[in-house]
Image (cartoon, rainbow, N blue to C red):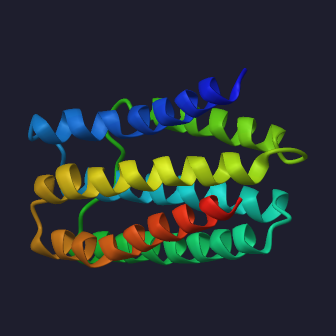
Amino acid sequence: MGIKSKRYLLTGLIVSLLATQSTLAQAGKMTDGEIIAVYNQVNTFDIETAGLALKCSKSKEVLSLATMVQNDHTGVRQMAADLAKELGVPKSLPAGRENATAEHAKTLKMLNKKCDDGFDRAYLKYEIDFHTAAIDAVENVLIPAANEQKLKSLMKKILPGFEHHLSETKRVYETM
């Protein structure tokens, strides 16, 4: 598989990952518990991807970025879980999210195969696509679909962190 086709695979994963969110939210069927569960699932995916970078990368900048991403997303995931508990909403993934899990597993497998060669650029490109799609989904799908003001506020509060991850990832990518 060539570089271009791998890039499209990663972009396709991101679109697939967030497609269920868009469909459900636009139909007005997503509950706050589902929003939090999807939010936590996506954060978990990025925590796992950053963990792989910590295992595979030799670049100090990539390792630093992956550490930041892993720590920040772990904190964000906990904040959302705490809010779900406070609001008393059960977290449950909406139907169809199994595809996102399967696609994420494929991405981890593909990135893991690059541990010896080309990992950093593939990881950084993935992170750029991932954060671009995640920011779009939070702004245009999850926040508008949320019913609880505290949930909307949490996502708005955290959004600048995702934007910071994106800008830092782009900066590191440009140096590779």
Q: Quadrant of residue 63?
A: bottom right
> Residue at (33%, 57%) from the top-left corner?
135
Q: Is residue 116 above or below residue 19?
A: below
Question: Which of 85 and 113 lies nearest the eye of the viewer?
Answer: 113
Looking at the picture, how far across and down is residue 103, in whole percent? 55, 32
> Residue at (26%, 69%) from the top-left corner?
155
Is 149 situated left or right of 138 in this image? left
> Residue at (12%, 67%) from the top-left corner?
148
Q: Quadrant of residue 124?
A: bottom right
Looking at the picture, how far across and down is residue 28, in whole percent? 9, 41
Question: Which of 110 and 58 lies nearest the eye of the viewer?
Answer: 58
Camera sees residue 29: no
Is 88 situated left or right of 57 in this image? left
Camera sees residue 133: yes
Looking at the picture, how far across and down is residue 119, in whole percent? 77, 49
Looking at the picture, how far across and down is residue 170, in whole percent? 53, 62
- The quadrant in which the C terminus is found is bottom right
> Residue at (39%, 52%) from the top-left corner?
132
Q: Is residue 172 above or below residue 4?
A: below
Is 41 situated left or right of 138 in this image? right
Q: Quadrant of residue 153?
A: bottom left
Please, which residue is most extreme toward the right here?
116
